Image (spheres, helix red, strand yellow):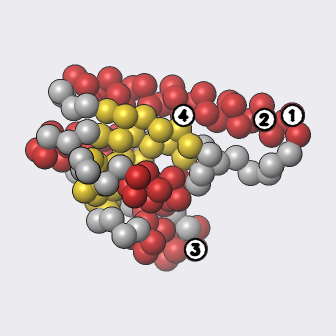
Amino acid sequence: MTMSVVLGYDESPGAVRALHVAIEVSAAFGEPLVLVYGAAVPGSLGEEYAAHRDAVRETGRSVLAHAVAVAEESGVRTRVEVVDQKPAEALIDAARRHGARCIVVGSWGESPLRGALLGATPHKLLHLARTPVLCVPTEP
C-alpha cells in the first residue's frame, strides 16, 4: 500500500501553517497529501438539515481548493475528502484508509486544560489516533 500524509484543513491560522508543514513532509517522502475537511452537521432530519449539510460541504470544497493549489504549486500530488464526520473522526478514518505516515493538524495554541474541556481536534487525535500526529503550532 502506498503511504500518504493526511492533513486536517479548515483555513484557520493553525491549519494554514500546518498545510505548509504537510507539504514539506509529503514532498520529502514523495507521497500524496490527502486534504480532509470534516463536515459533520448537528441534527439529522428535515430539509433544513439537508440544506445546512450541503452548505457545509460546499464550504469545505471551497476551503480545500486553496490548499490544493498551494500543494500542487509545490509539486505535491493531492486528494481531497469532504466527509460527513467530525474532524477528529474524519482524520482518523482517512489515515486508516490511505495508509497515512502521519496526520498533520494545526493548533490554536490552547492550553491543555482548555483543549481537554472543549474536545479540540488535536487533543482528541493525540489520544485516539493510532497514526502519529504532527501538531503544528500557529506561531512560528
Q: Secondary structure under badge 3? A: helix
Using the image, determine if residue 102 lies above or below residue 61.
Answer: below
Residue ID at (18%, 27%): 75
Q: Residues within 10 Å of mark 1 (few under 14, many from 20)?
A: few
Residue type at the position of mark 1: Glu
Residue ID at (35%, 28%): 68
Which residue does the numbered mark 2 point to in the structure image? 50
Residue 85 x/y as whole percent = 60, 51
Q: Secondary structure under badge 4? A: helix
Q: Nearer the viewer, mark 3 or mark 1?
A: 1
Q: CA distance from mark 2 to mark 4?
A: 15 Å
Q: Earlier in the sequence, mark 3 or mark 1?
A: 1
Q: Quadrant of residue 56?
A: top right
Which residue does the numbered mark 4 point to in the structure image? 60
Q: Residues within 10 Å of mark 4 (few under 14, many from 20)?
A: many
Q: Earlier in the sequence, mark 2 or mark 4?
A: 2
Q: Are marks 4 and 3 in contact (CB under 8 Å)?
A: no
Q: Are marks 4 and 1 in contact (CB under 8 Å)?
A: no
Left or right of 87? Residue 103 is left
Q: Earlier in the sequence, mark 4 or mark 1?
A: 1
Q: Residues within 10 Å of mark 3 (few under 14, many from 20)?
A: few
Q: CA distance from mark 3 to mark 2?
A: 30 Å
Which residue does the numbered mark 1 point to in the structure image? 47
Q: Are marks 3 and 2 in contact (CB under 8 Å)?
A: no
Q: Quadrant of residue 64?
A: top left
Which residue does the numbered mark 3 point to in the structure image? 117
Q: Secondary structure under badge 1? A: helix
Q: Are marks 3 and 1 in contact (CB under 8 Å)?
A: no
Q: Earlier in the sequence, mark 3 or mark 2?
A: 2
